[in-house]
Image (spheres, grey):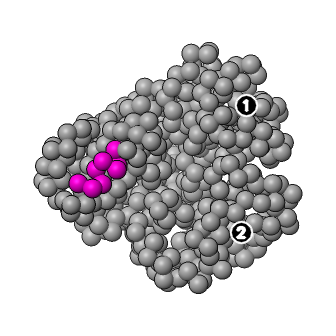
Amino acid sequence: MPIRSLFIANRGEIAVRIIRAARELGIETIQAYSDADESSLAVQIADRAVNVGPPHATKSYLRVDGMVQAARDAGADAVHPGYGFLAENAEFADAVVAAGMTFVGPDGDMIRMMGDKVSARQAAIRAGVPVVPGSEGRIDDPDAARALAEEIGFPVMIKAAAGGGGRGIRIADDMAAFEAELPKARAEAEAAFGDGGLYIEKVIGQARHIEVQVLGDGENVVHCYERECSLQRRRQKVWEEAPAACLNDAVRAKLCDSAVALAKAVNYQGAGTVEYLYDDATEEFYFIEMNTRIQVEHPCSEWITGLDLVAEMIRIAGGGKLRHAQSDIEARGHAIEVRLNAEDPANNFMPFPGLVGDLRLPGGPGVRFDSMLYSGYAIPPFYDSLLGKLIVWAETRDEAITRLDSALSELTIEGVKTTAPLFRALAADATVREGDFHTKWLEGWLTDNAARLT
């Protein structure tokens, strides 16, 4: 049934984003907050707010029982998890439903299947989606792992089956490195995700990271075209754009159709992202994982299609069907998003929480800034350093980069260091302008251009 009251089980800019979408749908918003977030923008603009515990996330935002009880006590009839924290926690999704509320996203079984890289890979194979050469299931036997690594050829990637966000990944260039990294990878996976399961994948050299945004209602699925997320630091995305300029129309169609085929095969419901590695040299793409939530970079897809993805996933969770056929969704122009973090890029990206002083945000045609900031806000040191996202749109990619640089020149966030200097330097870089990069490119660039980040 339609959602009347929505509990936001998250914080920061995504909480603000969800509140704004819900408000336009006429839905009451109830914001969860820790002691550290009592003065947050999300708390200030929500209809109501509920304290869920101490500052540390393990005692507040990551407590399944506490979050569910808080939502239930507040009288919410639905819960939106945002991204991060409990967004891809199957037990949380199950608990929300068991408490008589609607979970805004796929159900727990879907999260389990697609959140486990092995079962997601198997689902992709069944749907006819190409996958990176690697193990067909979890690798528990060291001898079998060695044999597979030799079979597919080095370098190989040892990955946590339950991993995400670039964590739980180790690269081995030869058998000696493989022997050393395998037990470390298992221990790291267990510590980070409570699951020591591993699988092995062939490393695709100089790959690009392309992802397809999908929407499903449990029966039908549409795509909202693709995004490129190849500019990464330590496997964390920093700059995203849509569409991917490296794809021709034929490859784009095959890529997007494959994402729809996978989502249809599993009867996907909600907003999701199907992620791929793309090999420029061969024009081949390979499925790597599916994220069963809204992505940080979703505004890029919103801007080129004109859809409000957060509102759409709320409507679907409330029992609505897809409102657009694939033929209705057209891509126009080019959008770029950069992630503004409270970090000092001139000092090895050291976190830099603090008190926001003078705040001046860019504006004008084709400029959007999604953030949690206001002048006088004390950025807490307990959470991810993301402050907000600057997103620009223009008719062409080159014009979008120029607009991004112009918007960054207007941006002032006094009192804290941010990653803005990194993006001004990238916007001026000839290789970035040409779009000639891959997932490892930025690491090398940072080594050679540290002086430009002050």
Q: Is residue 280 visible?
A: yes
Mark 1 closeness class: few <14, some 14–19, many ≥20 residues within 10 Å: many
Q: Which residues are magenta?
A: 179-186
Q: Earlier in the sequence, mark 2 or mark 1?
A: 1
Tag of residue 297: none
Q: Quadrant of the N terminus?
A: top right
Q: Would you say residue 180 sits in the magenta stretch?
A: yes
Looking at the image, which is closer to me, 299 or 51?
51
Side of 185 relative to 335 (left or right): left
The numbered dot on residue 52 is 1
- Estimate the spatial distance between the alpha carbons at disc 2 and disc 1, rounded to whole Å: 29 Å
Percent x, y for residue 207?
Answer: 34, 64
Question: Whole-percent x and y of residue 373?
Answer: 78, 55
* Element on which disc 2 rests: loop
Tell me the kind of residue under disc 1: Val
What residue do we see at 44% from left, 53% from top?
Answer: 166
Please tell me the numbered disc located at residue 417: 2
Quadrant in which residue 220 is drawn:
top left
